[in-house]
C-alpha cells in the first residue's frame, strides 16, 4: 500500500464521486510508483459498497483520462484479472483541491516584505576608481558535464495531443492490446483513431505519452467495437488527406427548425469548426415535447456522439433543459430484404 499515492489522490481534483474513492482505494493497493494494482472489479465494488457496473464505468473513465494505465493480465484463482498502474505524472499534473491550493499559496507568499538592497555585485569598496558598469566574471562550466535533465527524475514532459498525431500501428501496441485490435473489422481501428484524435484536439489536456493513452483506449473500446461488429455496423476508415471522416447528412435534417439551427450554431462555436463538422453537422437535432432527439447517420456515429458530446450539448442548452436522446437513423428497407440494417 502507498500512503503517498493515497494522499496525492485526495489532494488533487480527480473528479466527482465515485472517482475519488475508487482511485484512492486502488492507490491503497499500489506501490509508491503507482504499480501493482490487480484487485478484481467485484472486490473493488464490495469494498466500496457500490455496484460492479459503477466500478467498470469509473475505471473506463479513469483510463480514458490517462490516470489509469492497463499493464496486462495477471493469473488468479478465477482465471485472470487486469493489472493497472496509476500514472503518477498525470495525477500530479492535476490542479490541487481548494484547501491545499490555498495552503500552497500561503507557503509561496508568506515571506515578509523588506527594503530592496542595492548592492554592488563586484564587491569593490567605494573609491574614486570604483567600477561604473558593475561587470562580473563567471567561471564557465566544464564541457565534460552532461546537461541537467530539466524535468528531473527522468520524467517525460506532458503536452497536448499534437496536431500531426499519427495513429499507432497495431504491431506497435502492447501484445495483448494488439491482439484485440486485430479482431476488429475493417476500418474500425482507423475510425476509432480518428474519434480519439478529434475528442482530445483543442481541449488543452496534457499527457506525457499519447501512444500509451491510445493503447488504453483500444483496450477500453474493444467490447463495444466487437458488439457493434456483431450488429452489422460498417466502419469507414479515416480519410488521411483531410484528417476527418466524410459523413453524409441524415434524411431527418429537413425536419430541423429555428431552435435547431440556433443550437447547432452554439455547438459549432463551443466545439470548434472541425469537431462540429465531423460529429454534429451531419446529425438532425429535433426538439420534441419530452426530449431533445439527436439523429446520427449510423450506430457507430451515435455511440461516439453519446459518449463524447452529449455532455456538451446539455451544457450549451443550460439547466432545466430537455434530456438529450441520441438515435441512429434507420436504413430504409430494401425490397426482398428481411430486416433493415441498423
Image (tube, rainbow, N blue to C red):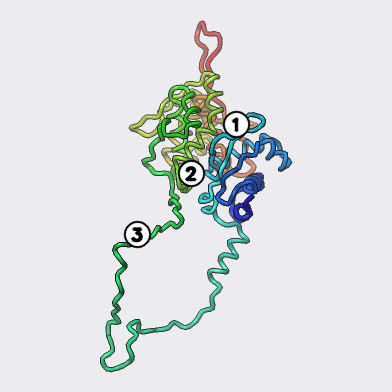
Where does the image place residue 19, in percent across and percent down from the top left?
63, 45
- Residue at label 2? 270
Q: Quadrant of the C terminus?
A: top right
Q: Residue at x 49, y 25 (%)?
A: 297
Q: Are marks 2 and 3 in contact (CB under 8 Å)?
A: no
Q: Which residue carries the number 3 mark?
A: 146
Residue 187 versus residue 266 in the image, above or below: above
Residue 294 percent across, percent down from the top left: 55, 30
Mark 3 vs mark 1: give the one in front: 3
Q: Is residue 16 visible?
A: no
Q: Pinpoint residue 38: horizontal percent, then vertical percent.
A: 62, 39
Q: CA distance from mark 3 to mark 1?
A: 58 Å
Q: Secondary structure at mark 3?
A: loop
Q: Nearer the viewer, residue 211 or 321?
A: 211
Answer left or right for 295 relative to 52: left
Earlier in the chain: of badge 2 and badge 3, it is 3
Dot 3 crowding, Cα within 10 Å, few <14, some 14–19, many 20+ = few
| Label 1 neighbour load within 10 Å: few <14, some 14-19, many 20+ | some
Asked if one can make out residue 2 in the rendered structure from this viewpoint, the answer is: yes
Q: Are marks 1 and 2 in contact (CB under 8 Å)?
A: no
Query: What residue is pinned by disc 1?
Result: 325
Task: Estimate the x, y position of residue 300 in percent, counting from the top left.
Answer: 51, 27
Identified at 54% across, 23% down, the residue is 228
Amino acid at each position: 500500500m502507498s500512503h503517498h499515492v493515497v494522499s496525492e489522490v485526495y489532494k488533487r481534483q480527480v473528479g466527482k464521486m465515485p472517482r475519488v474513492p475508487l482511485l484512492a482505494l486502488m492507490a491503497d493497493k499500489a506501490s509508491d510508483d503507482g504499480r501493482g494494482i490487480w484487485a478484481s472489479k467485484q472486490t473493488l465494488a464490495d469494498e466500496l459498497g457500490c455496484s460492479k457496473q459503477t466500478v467498470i464505468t469509473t475505471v473506463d473513465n479513469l483510463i480514458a483520462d490517462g490516470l489509469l494505465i492497463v499493464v496486462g493480465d495477471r493469473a488468479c484463482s478465477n482465471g485472470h484479472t487486469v493489472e493497472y498502474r496509476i500514472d503518477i505524472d498525470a495525477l500530479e499534473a492535476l490542479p490541487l483541491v481548494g484547501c491545499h491550493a490555498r495552503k500552497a499559496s500561503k507557503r509561496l507568499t508568506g515571506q515578509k516584505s523588506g527594503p530592496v538592497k542595492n548592492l554592488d555585485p563586484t564587491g569593490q569598496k567605494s573609491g574614486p576608481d570604483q567600477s561604473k558598469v558593475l561587470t562580473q566574471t563567471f567561471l564557465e562550466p566544464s564541457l565534460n558535464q552532461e546537461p541537467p535533465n530539466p524535468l528531473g527524475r527522468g520524467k517525460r514532459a506532458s503536452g497536448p495531443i499534437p496536431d500531426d498525431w499519427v495513429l499507432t500501428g497495431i504491431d506497435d501496441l502492447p501484445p495483448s492490446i494488439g491482439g484485440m485490435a486485430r479482431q476488429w473489422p475493417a476500418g474500425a481501428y482507423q475510425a476509432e483513431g480518428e474519434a480519439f484524435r478529434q475528442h482530445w484536439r483543442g481541449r488543452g489536456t496534457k499527457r506525457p505519452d499519447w501512444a500509451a493513452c491510445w493503447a488504453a483506449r483500444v483496450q477500453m473500446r474493444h467490447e463495444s467495437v466487437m458488439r457493434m461488429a456483431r450488429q452489422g455496423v460498417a466502419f469507414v476508415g479515416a480519410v488521411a488527406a483531410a484528417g476527418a471522416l466524410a459523413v453524409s447528412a441524415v434524411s431527418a435534417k429537413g425536419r430541423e427548425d429555428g431552435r435547431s439551427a440556433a443550437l447547432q450554431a452554439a455547438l459549432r462555436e463551443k466545439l470548434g469548426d472541425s469537431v462540429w463538422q465531423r460529429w454534429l453537422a451531419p446529425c438532425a437535432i429535433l426538439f420534441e415535447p419530452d426530449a431533445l432527439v439527436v439523429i446520427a447517420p449510423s450506430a457507430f456515429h451515435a455511440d461516439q456522439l453519446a459518449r463524447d458530446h452529449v455532455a456538451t450539448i446539455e451544457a450549451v442548452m443550460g439547466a432545466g433543459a430537455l434530456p438529450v436522446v441520441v438515435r441512429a437513423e434507420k436504413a430504409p428497407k430494401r425490397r426482398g430484404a428481411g430486416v433493415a440494417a441498423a
